[in-house]
Image (cartoon, helix red, strand yellow):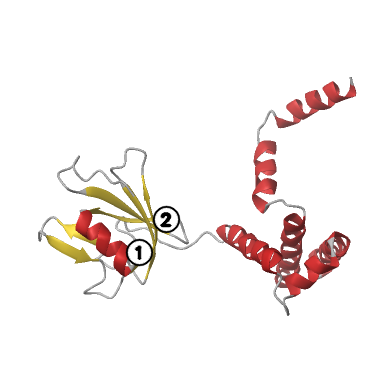
């Protein structure tokens, strides 16, 4: 990776982002030596401007930042460091250096879940329920989506909230399996909903249908 260390006198800003939650954890500075040590050890290392030496985050507290990926920006002078923290990032004990909570948005797990299901689709390991669904084909998968939808409706009308959430989870899982089988993503569904959120969406839709009719 080409990094322009000369622009700021041998240092580049390194923005650290939690690879799982996508939250920004801290900002530090790296020189070439700190960058090389980060890549070599897998522990995010900075150049301490106050102490004038290398500093591996967590070497005292044990709250290491475990490297996942480093990306350079368009000007090659700012790094985005994706890492998984072992504990609080800030020396004050907070999750981030801005005092923010680093909890993951559960909605992000849907992307992670589909990534896992796509891997199952690619590798088809024995003993996996997901594999068995893919082997039975789209008709059986679609049938399961219908069955889980019905069970969700039953719990919504005659059951408890806990059971409804349980059945809705089954429904969503089988829906993602069906999307994967069709070469689609849950993000495609989210994108469609986002389009519909536009106040002008219904008007545009009617215009499109009118053109199709002609």
Q: Nearer the viewer, residue 160 or 70?
A: 70
Q: Kindly identify the residue that appears in the image at 87 percent across and 65 percent down.
A: 140
Residue 39 screen position, x and y as percent:
32, 62
Mark 2 to mark 1 CA distance (whole Å): 10 Å
Q: Earlier in the sequence, mark 2 or mark 1?
A: 2
Whether residue 21 is visible? yes
Residue 89 screen position, x and y as percent:
31, 65
Labels 2 and 1 touching (C-beta < 8 A): yes
Q: Which residue is mark 2?
A: 23
Q: Kindly identify the residue that appears in the image at 62 percent across and 65 percent down.
A: 116
Q: Is residue 186 above or below residue 173?
A: above
Residue 71 screen position, x and y as percent:
38, 50
Q: Kindly identify the residue that appears in the image at 19 percent across and 65 percent down.
A: 55
The extreme left residue here reads: 51
Whether residue 44 is visible? no
Q: Which residue is mark 1?
A: 95
Residue 77 screen position, x and y as percent:
28, 43
Disc count in the image?
A: 2
Q: Residues within 10 Å of mark 1 (few under 14, many from 20)?
A: many
């Amino acid at each position: 990776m080409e990094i322009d260390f000369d622009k700021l006198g041998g240092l580049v800003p390194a923005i650290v982002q939690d690879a799982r939650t996508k939250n920004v954890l801290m900002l530090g500075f790296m020189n070439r030596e700190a960058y090389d040590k980060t890549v070599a050890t897998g522990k995010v290392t900075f150049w301490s401007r106050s102490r004038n030496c290398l500093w591996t985050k967590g070497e005292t507290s044990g709250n290491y930042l475990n490297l996942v990926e480093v990306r350079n920006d368009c000007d090659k002078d700012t790094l985005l460091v994706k890492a998984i923290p072992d504990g609080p990032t800030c020396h004050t004990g907070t999750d981030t250096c801005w005092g923010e909570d680093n909890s993951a948005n559960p909605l992000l797990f849907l992307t992670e879940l589909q990534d896992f299901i796509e891997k199952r689709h690619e590798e088809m390991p024995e003993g996996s329920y997901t594999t068995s669904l893919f082997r039975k084909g789209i008709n059986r998968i679609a049938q399961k989506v219908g069955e889980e939808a019905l069970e969700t409706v039953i719990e919504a009308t005659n059951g408890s909230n806990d059971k409804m959430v349980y059945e809705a989870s089954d429904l969503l899982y089988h829906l993602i399996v069906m999307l994967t089988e069709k070469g689609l993503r849950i993000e495609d569904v989210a994108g469609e909903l986002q389009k519909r959120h536009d106040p002008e969406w219904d008007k545009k839709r009617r215009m499109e249908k009118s053109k199709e009719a002609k």
